[in-house]
Image: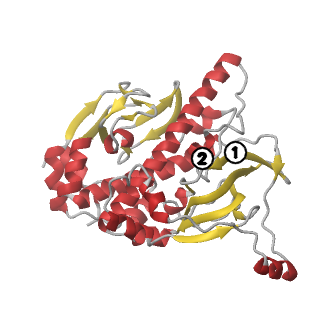
């Protein structure tokens, strides 16, 4: 076994995979040495490769602004590796001499069919790393803004009020839309077998929500994700003792709060408030992890797709902020009612204005060792 292959099979993401199965995919690898300062690709490039960094470090940039570091064991290029016509969301440049292995999309498709345990390990790493990346990016970019709405609070109703609500509920006036069509409309589920969709749907629980109901408050422990079936949900960030800033409105058919399925020890970085009575489907961490086989695979491909969309839109917004700051010579202001923020934020994110460089320069797109052990298990 070559030194490159030895490093590959001993990466943390393969700790749960039998050694012989990892070795079976080694012929698919494209090994590459990358000299310091080389640009692997630029934002907007159409890509069809996924990479794993064996040594060295890579830096992601948007409009020349560093937004994070990828170190040994980190994955990169998920958008091109997993999805057709995927366009790169950032420039990627080597900080130092690096060694990488590359998979083409066709290689991943072959692994999915012939070596599913290896494919699942790579998919699990990509979803987990992107969840960390989304959380780190939105927290690093967060800046206070003048509040335009009241800060959400969760209040217990008095006994008489609770009795009245039980007799005259303030929830939706129409029945809950069925879940299967909502799942079928997800880009990753368009051609999935009905039996697989049913397995995924079984993990969701529907619930009605009232206008003004607080689903979660900024700072709450994460507790799963939601799919909006009917009605409306607004995302609000605290900006003072009694004020909040409107960030986005979730559209029917969209997931939000997905980081709660990958970062169980994290806290919500924004509040979710029901703006129009309706229906939600909720899935928690245990239910998400209960999926097996093809259902688990499709569900995690769906999570990966949603995280990629958040990263893509937040990087575009960041690029606009950087250009605005350069052109004006002043810190860029964030428009709080940007219509694209829903796809950027889910329920977990916020954007920034000034002072990006110090925080973003130090971001690393790789989870820590303890988190890896929890996610990927002990070494074989």
Instruction: Report the quarter where the C terminus lies.
Output: bottom left
Q: Helix or strand or loop: what does disc 2 sit on?
A: helix
Q: What residue is at 81 percent from the left and 82 percent from the top?
A: 163
Which disc, if any, is residue 280? none
Q: Where is residue 147 shown, x and y percent of the image?
A: 81, 44
Side (left or right) of 147 relative to 1: right
Which disc, if any, is residue 345? 2
Q: Can residue 89 be seen at all in this image of the molecule?
A: yes
Please identify the residue farthest to the front as the structure is shown.
174
CA gap, disc 2 and disc 1: 8 Å
Q: How is the image coloured?
A: secondary structure
Q: Quick one: 292 or 176, which is closer to the camera?
A: 176
Q: Which residue is mark 1?
A: 247
183 vs 36: above or below: below
121 vs 72: above or below: below
Instruction: Specify which label sits upstream in the sequence, 2 or 1.
Output: 1
Q: What residue is at 48 percent from the left and 60 percent from the top?
A: 262
Q: What residue is at 53 percent from the left and 24 percent from the top?
A: 63
Query: On the image, which quarter does residue 361 sit in?
Result: top right
Side (left or right) of 72 relative to 280: left
Q: Residues within 10 Å of mark 2 (few under 14, many from 20)?
A: many
Disc 2 and disc 1 in contact, CB within 8 angstroms = yes
Please identify the residue farthest to the top as the structure is shown.
327
Side (left or right) of 205 relative to 250: left
Q: Quick one: 162 or 110, which is closer to the camera?
A: 162
Q: What residue is at 61 percent from the left and 59 percent from the top?
A: 230
């Amino acid at each position: 076994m070559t030194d490159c292959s030895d490093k590959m099979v001993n990466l943390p993401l393969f700790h749960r995979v039998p050694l012989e199965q990892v070795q079976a995919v080694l012929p698919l690898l494209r090994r590459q040495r990358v000299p310091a300062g080389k640009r692997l690709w630029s934002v907007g490039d159409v890509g069809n490769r996924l990479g794993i960094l064996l040594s060295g470090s890579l830096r992601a940039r948007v409009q020349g602004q560093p937004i994070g570091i990828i170190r040994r064991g980190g994955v990169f290029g998920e958008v091109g590796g997993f999805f057709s016509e995927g366009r790169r969301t950032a420039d990627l440049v080597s900080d130092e001499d690096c060694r990488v292995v590359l998979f083409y999309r066709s290689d991943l498709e072959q692994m999915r069919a012939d070596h599913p345990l290896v494919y699942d390990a790579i998919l699990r790493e990509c979803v987990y790393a992107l969840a960390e990346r989304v959380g780190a990016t939105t927290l690093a970019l967060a800046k206070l803004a003048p509040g335009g709405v009241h800060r959400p609070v969760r209040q217990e109703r008095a006994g008489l009020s609770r009795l009245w609500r039980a007799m005259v509920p303030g929830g939706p006036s129409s029945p809950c839309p069925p879940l299967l069509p909502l799942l079928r409309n997800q880009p990753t589920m368009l051609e999935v077998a009905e039996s697989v969709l049913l397995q995924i749907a079984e993990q969701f629980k529907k619930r009605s929500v009232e206008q003004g109901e607080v689903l979660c408050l900024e700072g709450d422990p994460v507790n799963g994700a939601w799919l909006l079936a009917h009605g409306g949900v607004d995302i609000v960030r605290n900006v003072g003792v009694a004020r909040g800033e409107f960030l986005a409105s979730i559209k029917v058919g969209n997931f939000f709060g997905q980081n709660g399925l990958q970062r169980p020890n994290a806290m919500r970085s924004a509040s979710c408030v029901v703006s129009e009575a309706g229906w939600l489907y909720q899935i928690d961490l245990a239910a998400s992890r209960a999926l097996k086989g093809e259902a688990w695979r499709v569900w995690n491909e769906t999570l990966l797709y949603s995280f990629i969309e958040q990263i893509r839109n937040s990087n575009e917004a960041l690029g606009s902020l950087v250009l605005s700051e350069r052109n004006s010579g002043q810190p860029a202001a964030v428009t709080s009612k940007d219509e694209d923020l829903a796809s950027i934020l889910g329920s977990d994110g916020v954007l920034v204005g000034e002072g990006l460089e110090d925080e973003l320069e130090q971001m690393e797109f790789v989870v820590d060792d303890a988190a890896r052990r929890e996610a990927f298990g002990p070494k074989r």
